[in-house]
Amino acid sequence: MSAKTWTPKPARPAPANTVGFVGWARENLFTTKLDSALTLLCAALIIYVLDVGLGWAIVDASFSGDDRNACLKPVQGACWPFIDAKFGQFIYGRYPEMERWRVDWVFALGLLGLVPLLMPTVGFKRANVIFMLGFYPMFSFFMLTGGSFGLAAVDTSDWGGLLVTLVVAVTGIVGSLPLGILLALGRRSDLPIVRALCVGFIEIFRGVPLITVLFMASVMLPLFLPDGVNFDKLMRCLIGVALFASAYMAEVVRGGLQAIPKGQYEAAAALGLGYWKTTRLIILPQALKLVIPGIVNTFIGLFKDTTLVLIVGLFDLLGIVQLHFTDSTWATPETHITGYAFAAFVFWVFCFAMSRYSIFMEKHLSTDPNQ
Amino acid sequence: MQVLVLAAVLGAMAWLVGNVQSNLERQNINSGFGFLSERAGFGINQTLIAYTEDDSFGRVLAVGLLNTLLVSALGIFFATLLGFSLGVARLSRNWLISKIAMVYIEIFRNVPLLLQIMFWYFGVLRNLPSPRQAVSIGDAIFMSNRGFVVLWLEASAGAFWYGLAALGLVIGGIWLRRRAANAQITTGQATRVWRPLLGLAVALFGGAALMAGVPFALDVPHLKGFNFRGGLTVIPEFVALLLALSLYTAAFIAEIVRAGINSVSKGQREASAALGLPESVALRLVVIPQALRVIIPPLTSQYLNLTKNSSLAVAIAYPDIVSVLAGTTLSQVGQALEIIFITMMIYLSLSLLTSWAMNRYNQRMAFVGNNT
Amino acid sequence: MQMLRKLSAGLLLLAVASFASTPAAEAAGQTLEIVKKRGHLKCGVSQGLPGFSTPDNRGNWTGIDVDFCKAVAAAIFNDADKVKFTPLSAKERFTAIQSGEVDIIARNTTWSMHRDTALGVDFPVVNYYDGQGFMVRADLGVRSARDLDGATLCTNQGTTTELNAADYFRSNGMQYEIVAFEKADESVAAYNSGRCDAYTTDHSALYAQKLKLSDPKAHIVLPEVISKEPLGPLVRQGDAAWNDLVRWTHYATVAAEEFGVTSKNISEMKSSSNPSIRRLMGQDGSFGDNLGLSKQWAVHIIRAVGNYGEIFERNVGVKTPLGIKRGVNALWTKGGLQYAPPIR
């Protein structure tokens, strides 16, 4: 008897309607009758939105021209030449044209330092942090304000556009994190007076709208200072924004601190570590890692809130776009929407990038073996 | 150490106060809250309570506060409605619906609110036609760049009885619901309440009609001179602000709702499916009540944010508290310290009040949850 | 309980920071000394009103009010460029001057009794006599402000304009709806888009804002002047010397026009034998010293910005896009209100 090897027949392919695009579509789009109806409705919605959106942004839009006449067609979409003509203003504000290279340098150097800092695989983190927190702010300060090293002085009232948006946002971000951590530690402190002060600070700043804080900072602060003592308006708004954001940051960090098991404190105490060493080496690294999404969300909120400085008379990106609507050489029915669309796009790119980066870092830093 | 900190803070404060004092003193600036009883003298274009130029700054404060509350309350309502729908849609098994919700969320929450407010006001609503070419819907709603004018009921004195009837209906409704719920607990029988409720409504409003006849007259909007007269006018500033606040906050609420629903374990859904509950019922009766416990704390802070964000009204001339108090009143009276203090206190109290109310609700939810 | 604690802590903090006032006698601030030490003048201006204070494309400020601050800077430093301009909204302006954010405000601000007596500010002088008016679309068919019954008005928040409009409509038994924007640009944009039937503000500003409309010719300014709006610079109360300096800066330009001294002929005029001109030029007397300035203070002013007539014609006059006639702002010798007390 010769041994017969039994070979099973190859499995039949899955029915055509469960694999490939058709199968996917059946599974995800047309599961039930209701589902199919909804899918069709949504498809119609998408087509409509795309039709209107692309029609406005591309098909009916104007792309070149020197004044409003380029954007007065009977069916007019976006007026892109307006953005083109004002682009320099939108980025630099009234920063003198001859000196704009200085802003470019600051932008470029910032990018150069930031990108490797954000990529987890690139080394030299410590050197980079020292560079970004030590050298870079000094460099930017002297480059942007001028008045020394042979650079012409540029008054902060001439700064504008994306430059102001980034200056406010970056200073707010850099300033609010350490302050927020201190406030959070203070709120969790055993010292009742310190705790009460921190709680008071946090609750007051979280309870009032940012514009009242900015208003105080922009015009009322000198009332609280001795006669004749004063400092720059942009500076005062920066402080206002940083204080405001630090209150929110403190609550985020507190969430992280609360999630650290008591055993960690006890273990640190058993090793003979003092309060600051425990906090710096054991607690904060774990707590901050836990709340990265919250921190980034606060950054995103802060970035969007920079637009409020326009209410107190600084011209951030939105403020400067708004300002140029009054230019009668570009007065058309579509100028406003075009300008807002441009500003919205710029803000969106920054915020969206930040939120994606936070998701990436969350995954990267996760020590959870199940992921 | 604590004493040191306290001393430092008190010292700094005394220094600040001293500076304020000497600055105010030197310049002979009015101080105190006496201005609140002075005549305001300016007009406001949306007032929920009676207001004329002869009223006081105190009344202005009340008008502004009510306007803030109105736009916040409606904003919270619409944002919640839209946010919950989007959150559920985001989790839909239907790929297209879920992606549309995602795109919406990513767009609206990543663009500054102030920009969105200005976009709706200066970008979109300004393109509506003038009143003489107003778009009308069935002669009941007229849309123009002066706002939306809506057919309205003009109530006379007898309307009081109708108000009473409505109040009775609400109380009756609550009572009926309670009774039905109790009956269900004791007998296991679910009773429907809408039939007796309908009867009650007919009885109550019939009674009111007998007492007062028909005390309502149709207030029909009509063009006269420059604008519509009659009807209820919703000013475009309000529309733009409400729209922007609702659409923006809804994106955040949607994410909160999604996280909340995801936090309910899958077994709960499977169990309700095993009990034969349709998906929509399972969502309504099983999943969302449990998700709410996770949802409510962050939802509260979104509500607070919306209320505080309503202060951006100042950019588009909606007469909210910041606009009429910290804006117009401030520049007429010139007492920045007092006025900013009042404004901040109002927001602080609103915010503490809201978080108190939501904490109460949250406690109740948690309690019920633990019992089941 | 914790909530209560939070609340009371917060209340305490704010209350302590905001109140408590015991009189503290202090010498009047020496604004001139501070300005001299700082090396430049800080001047609050509008956020952009053509003819009065507006930045051009290169960021240089121009206008009557800007020239006023330049004149003050020239009087102090003999350099009209030693001045920094801070754009302020209508509601920020009083707080900004109270708090010392700026040394002087030249922001087409109306001198009213309440502002002068209750806000801790002083109005040294009037540099432009104005009155409130209305602008409407020409095709609306309105020819007089009396036809505006039921109209919607756009205006700027926190101005005397807002109050005057209320008074005017009420006293004439007319209805109105007011939409008050924080920034002038926003009011104009709203009016331009049809949110309002009329835009109301000072006459001079109506002509200025008209230039910003998409079709200036389609709009008319109604003839009525419904209020007195004496516009002038303002300073902090309590520094009489600074007040004098600002007042006489204006009078120097008016006197110069009266005597025919201009920025062009100023060098020749120095050798004039007319005693009035000699005093103005600092050839006789010690008027500059008394102000804490150099003898040549008025020469510096006129060389930098010209006399009042030159300032007016350069910024808002008939040859500019605004095209405003001198009217009440003519010299008193020509039937106007501009009148400088004698320099002697």
Image (spheres, rainbow, N blue to C red):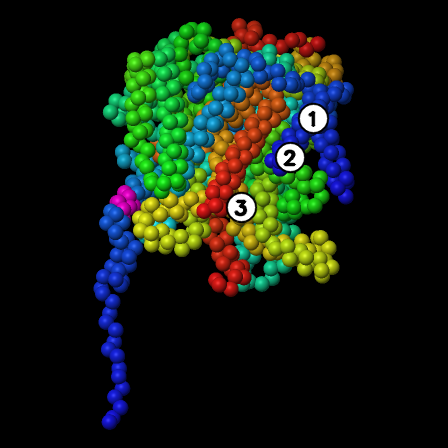
The chain that hosts pointer 2 is C
**Label 3 vs label 1: CA separation?**
34 Å
Badge 3 amino acid: Phe
Overall secondary structure of the magenta section? helix
**Residue C62 placement: quadrant:** top right
Q: Secondary structure at mark 2?
A: helix
Q: Secondary structure at mark 3?
A: helix
Mark on residue B115?
Answer: none
**Magenta stretch containing residue A44, yes or no?**
yes
- Report which residue position mark 1 lands on: B20
Where residue B186 appears, as percent x and y from the top left, is 39, 40
Residue nearer the viewer, B131 or C160: B131
Residue A219 showing in the rendered view: yes
Residue C39 showing in the rendered view: no
**Label 1 vs label 2: CA separation?**
27 Å
In the visual, does A9 lie left or right of A357? left
Residue nearer the viewer, C275 or B142: B142
What residue is rendered at 71% in x and 57% in y? A269
The chain that hosts pointer 1 is B
- Report which residue position mark 2 lands on: C5
- Image: magenta residue range: A38-48
Mark on residue A299?
Answer: 3
In the visual, does C22 lie left or right of B349? right
Badge 1 amino acid: Val
The chain that hosts pointer 3 is A
What residue is rendered at 71% in x and 39% in y? A193
Task: Specify few, some or many for label 3: CA neighbours under 10 Å numbering under 14, 14-19, or 20 or more.
Answer: many
Of tags 1 and 2, the one toward the viewer is 2
